[in-house]
Image (cartoon, rainbow, N blue to C red):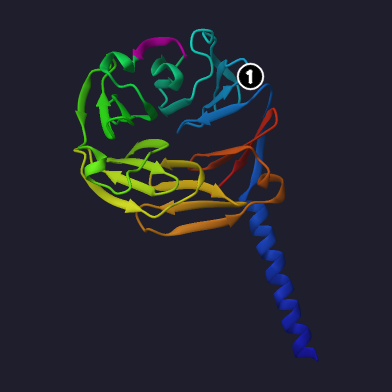
Amino acid sequence: MIKKITISLFFIVLAIVAQAQSDTLFRTLRTITGDIVGFTVDNLDNIYLISSSNQVKKLNANGDSVAIFNNVKKYGQATLIDVSNPLKVLLYYRDFATIVVLDRFLSVRNTIDLRRQNILQVKAIGQSYDNKIWVYDELENKLKKIDEDGSVLGETPDFRQLFDPTPSPQGIFDEDQFVYLYDSSMGVYAFDYYGALKNKIPINHWNNFKVSGKYVYGSNAGNLYRYSIRTLLTEEWKLPVELQHARSFNFTSTRLYALRKDRIDIYDFH
């Protein structure tokens, strides 16, 4: 009887420790409230808020407002915001095939009309390591690099000649000498800067997908995932109940951001 009680207490203690570790993993740092329908974060933990009127507001890591982009009437709602380079923010308006380039104060530096280069259908764009821009041309099925004038500097072969079926990436990420294309139904394609496929990572159906440093982040069905590009191992955590109903997530190396109705909760995450 004593032995059975000891074993039972042991498992109770394990359960308590596991719960404590889960709670500690998502320690609340702060909450930002306001008219927020979307957001993203850069690698310095600056936060870029999108309001229902399409305004973009930049907050620093302490939550202080540092810049606002209000020129929203011409193109409407941005389809994508790329802040992988905090000094150069890209707003992509898919309906107009137009990229607006902002500086770190969210002032307009340049506007790129992709249609002038006969690039008519683009779902995903991303910044390159050398301050250029990656775009995936859906009509030609090619990954292309363009400059701020929209001129094509380089491109891959037609993906229809390389893959069957052909991927249709929803995201492009330039990290640590590789370009990652994510198609949620087909996985992650890693290319070198010459357009050669180096690896295919079998990650499918992740939401809130992001490549940052040596990790790939995402979520699905109440779970948070972190895949190590170096070790090829995937870590998985069950999200607390209050986080499972968040509208979207974003990640940096030390923080988790969760969007709910008119607020963003920021958690310490290691």
Return the residue nearer the eye: 155 or 164: 164
Return the residue nearer the eye: 6 or 107: 107
Return the residue nearer the eye: 269 or 153: 153
Q: Is residue 81 visible?
A: yes
Q: Is residue 211 above or below residue 233?
A: above
- For image coordinates 68% across by 30% down, the residue present is 263
Horizontal side of residue 27 vs 200, given as left or right: right
- For image coordinates 51% across by 27% down, the residue present is 46
Could you say whether the residue bearing mark 1 is in a helix, strand or loop? loop
Estimate the x, y position of residue 15 in percent, counting from the top left.
70, 68
Crowding at dot 1, Cα within 10 Å, few <14 / some 14-19 / many 20+, comes out as few
Q: Is residue 244 magenta?
A: no
Q: Is residue 8 above or below residue 153?
A: below
Q: Is residue 62 visible?
A: no
Residue 170 lies in what quarter of the image? Answer: top left
Estimate the x, y position of residue 247 in percent, counting from the top left.
63, 37
Q: Is residue 191 above or below residue 141?
A: below
Estimate the x, y position of residue 227 in percent, counting from the top left.
44, 53
Horizontal side of residue 189 vs 73, given as left or right: left
Dominant secondary structure of the residues highlighted in magenta in the image: strand
Tag 1 residue: 52
Horizontal side of residue 132 vs 102, given as left or right: left
Q: Which residues are magenta?
A: 106-112
Residue 56 lies in what quarter of the image? Answer: top right
